[in-house]
Structure formats: C-alpha cells, structure tokens
Image (tube, grey):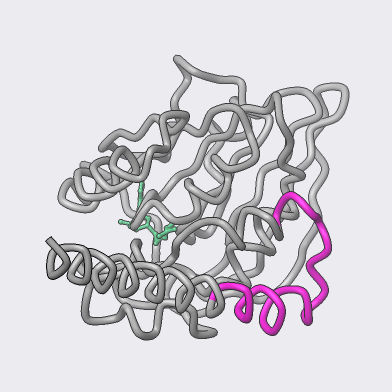
Amino acid sequence: MRLLIIILLMISGTVFCQKDKYESQRQRMVDDQIVARGISDLATLKAMTEVPRHLFVPAAYIKEAYSDRPLPIGYSQTISQPFVVAYMTELVKPAKGKKALEIGTGSGYQAAVLAEIVDTVYTIEIVPELAKEAATRLKLLGYHNIVAKYGDGYKGWPEHGPFDIIIVTAAADHIPQPLKDQLAEGGRLVMPVGNPATAQELILLTKRNGKISEQRLETVWFVPLKRLR
Ligand code: SAH
C-alpha cells in the first residue's frame, strides 16, 4: 500500500512538474515575444497564456513549441509564429458574443486562441489529414465552441455567416470576394495579401455601413492559399 502511494505521488509529481514547465515557458513567450512587441489587448494576452501550444505541434518539435518562430506541422504547412497569432488576434478585436471564421485550420492553434475569447469559431482546412487531426485535437482539448471542416475556404462558409471576425492564415494575391461578402456589419477581416511565393502585407478590412475600408500593415510570410479544383 505504501509503495502504491509513493508511486502515485511520483507520477503526479512528474505530471505537475511538466505542467509547470510548459506554463512557465508559455508565460515567458507572452512576456518576451508578445507584450514586449506591443500587444496589449488583455483578452488576447490571456488566451495566449492559456492555450497549450505544445499540444499543437508534432512530438518532434515539443521542445521548441514556445520559441519565437513558426514550426512545421507536416504536409508542407506550418503553425504560425506566436507573435503573428497574437497580432492577428488583437487586430480583429475578439470579444464575447462574436462569431469568427478562420480559413486555414492547420494545427488548430489560431482557432483555439480565438475560441478562448469569442462565442463560436468556424474553421476550414484544405488538407484532409490536417483537418481531421485538428478536429480530433480540438475536441480532445475540450474546445466545444469550434466547428471544423475539410474544404476550400476561398468560398467561406455562407451557411454560418455573416461573421464578425474573419482570419485567413494563408496568402493570396487578393482577398476572396465571398469572404468580403460574409463579413458582418462592423466586422473585421485580416489576411496576408501579396506574392504567395515570397512576402505579403497583412491587410485589415473593416466593414462600416456596408462599405469596406482597407488598412495595410506589417510584412509577413505565410504559406499559399490553395484552391480545390
Ligand atoms: N492557422 C494555422 C496555421 C495555418 S498554415 C495554425 O494555427 O496552425 C495555413 C493553412 O491553410 C495550412 O494548413 C493550409 O493547408 C491551409 N489552406 C491553404 N489553402 C486553403 C484553403 N483554400 N482553404 C482552407 N485551408 C487552406
């Protein structure tokens, strides 16, 4: 009996230490990479502090999960750099009561960050294997307010629109018209636009009184938005 208790204590000790290890790495990521570079929206910072990024990367990259760079997630795709996720999240002004659409689920990390704040996140992924993996991961982690599907996000998800927030995490030379159409009044859309093979500019669209205005922001590097034929 005493041996059993000792073994149980050792196991729970290891689990707690692991948890502490990732929590402190995550806090350092938020302080050094995100707050230090000017992100100040409290909801965004809280979400970045809570989502366990190490559970969204392949096992081989767990040690680097909180480093200041994008990481490979297979199928020639990447999970974005933590700062870029935080920056795009802050730009779309997430809040309770809002509905979001993400194009490019990838690992599901950006969707999880949004889902910590908004009511519902709809997310679409064009690589079937990634779509399946992300949906399973998000369900296991208890993100019941994320609806994920496989498909071509170019056309958006009209059945669930209009959306207060649209985040596109893959690059193209223009913003798809269906996404502009599915942006709600007062809504915000952010997308990397430019040459998908090199660098792009992050573009923020805002819809007011049915009119869309555009702001050009930072230079970014995203994987290309693909099309289903
Ligand atoms: N947001 C992701 C990272 C995105 S990488 C994360 O947090 O991990 C960009 C993703 O967009 C890739 O997984 C890619 O397969 C996907 N993608 C590319 N074109 C797409 C399209 N037309 N519709 C949906 N997903 C697309």
The N terminus: image quadrant: bottom left
Q: Nearer the viewer, residue 207 or 23?
A: 23
Residue 89, x across and y down, in percent: 66, 53
The C terminus: image quadrant: top left
Task: Give the side of residue 214 with respect to residue 227, left or right.
Answer: right
Residue 178, x across and y down, in percent: 52, 30
Task: Give the side of residue 3 with respect to residue 86, left or right.
Answer: left
Instruction: Assign the magenta stretch its main secondary structure.
Output: helix
Q: From the viewer's perspective, is residue 180 above or below residue 138?
A: above
Q: Residue at x 33, y 54 (%)?
A: 226
Q: From the viewer's perspective, is residue 120 above or below residue 57?
A: above
Q: Nearer the viewer, residue 82 or 32?
A: 32
Task: Inspect this view and state whether residue 121 appears.
Answer: yes
Residue 60 in magenta stretch: no
Q: Residue at x 52, y 71 (%)?
A: 23
Q: Which residues are magenta?
A: 26-44
Q: Residue furthest top?
A: 159
Residue 165, x across and y down, in percent: 65, 37
Q: From the viewer's perspective, is residue 214 above or below residue 3?
A: above
Q: Nearer the viewer, residue 9 or 139?
A: 9
Residue 74, x across and y down, in percent: 21, 69
Figure quadrant of residue 124: top left
